[in-house]
Amino acid sequence: MIKYSHIPPSSSPTRTINKDGAIEVLADEAEALKFKLTDGVDVAKDGTVYFTDASYKYNLHEFFQDIMEGRPRGRLISFDPISKRPNVLLTDLYFANGIAVSPHQDCVIFCETPMRRCRKYYIEGHKKGHVEKFIDNLPGMPDNIKYDGDGHYWIALPTGNTMFWDIAMRYSMVRKAAAMVDRWIGWIGRIKSEKNGGMLVVDINGKPVAHYRDVELTMVTSGFKLKNHLYIGSFILPYIIRIDLDQHPARHSQ
């Protein structure tokens, strides 16, 4: 039986943990607005920390409510290790989730889960401060994104596209009804309907290269390629899966 522990609603500060296990809170707010659901994080070579605050209203255990309300409450934030101050780079994002600094250190790629897209925010060069499309119309709802050091980004897809999600994202009344049901059954009842989770591989320009998925796989929230193995896991369900990429080649995307 899967057991879930309750964490009371609170702010979601950004912390560091040293090699001795000591925890330091770097920041718990930006522009006088408390973090509620700090999510993806990556660090540039100059030490700047880039992270997302998925919602300023709901915490981790309430994230489905945020998605169903369909309001842009997410933010993209940087943390300067010298001044030790956070800086809000973008606001009005739809559940800002995973983030990855590009190999050229000129931009960060971030995911917006309900929009089924990842976008690019420039942190250097003549486009600094601009936002561009990286990839949209994903074959599922994106969570974390990781760069593998070998020319590819790996995007975790907790669930594939379904008729429910397509309809829910179009009609607010469907989202309101789903939010009400969620308050009664929670994730234990809902995860059974989420299918076709997996990992989408794209190149540095956002072009799909391969798609790992399984109809029974659900709630994949993160994945990482290490040598010839792919490791995937979930913060919802208690599993870690290792796939030998030589023995199990991906289904290539068109």
Image (cartoon, grey):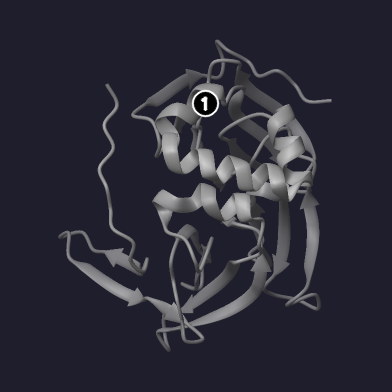
Foreground pick, 194 / 43: 194
Label 1 Cα crowd, 10 Å radius (few <14 / some 14-19 / many 20+): many
* Residue 86 image offset from top left, x and y in percent: 48, 81
Relative to 94, say whether 206 is above or below: above
The quadrant in which residue 212 appears is top right
The quarter of the rendered structure image containing the N terminus is top left
Residue matched to label 1: 218
Relative to 82, say whether 243 is above or below: above
* Residue 141 image offset from top left, x and y in percent: 64, 40
Relative to 203, say whether 71 is above or below: below
Relative to 175, say whether 120 is above or below: below
* Residue 245 image offset from top left, x and y in percent: 55, 19
Q: Is residue 233 visible from the viewing direction of this image?
A: yes
Q: Residue at x 61, y 39 (%)?
A: 154
Foreground pick, 188 / 76: 188
The quarter of the rendered structure image containing the C terminus is top right
Residue most extreme to the top: 247
Foreground pick, 11 / 144: 11
* Residue 92 image offset from top left, x and y in percent: 67, 70
In this picture, residue 225 sits left or right of residue 151: left
Q: Is residue 150 visible from the viewing direction of this image?
A: no
Could you tell me the amino acid type at mark 1? Thr
Q: Residue at x 54, y 15 (%)?
A: 216
Q: Residue at x 51, y 32 (%)?
A: 220
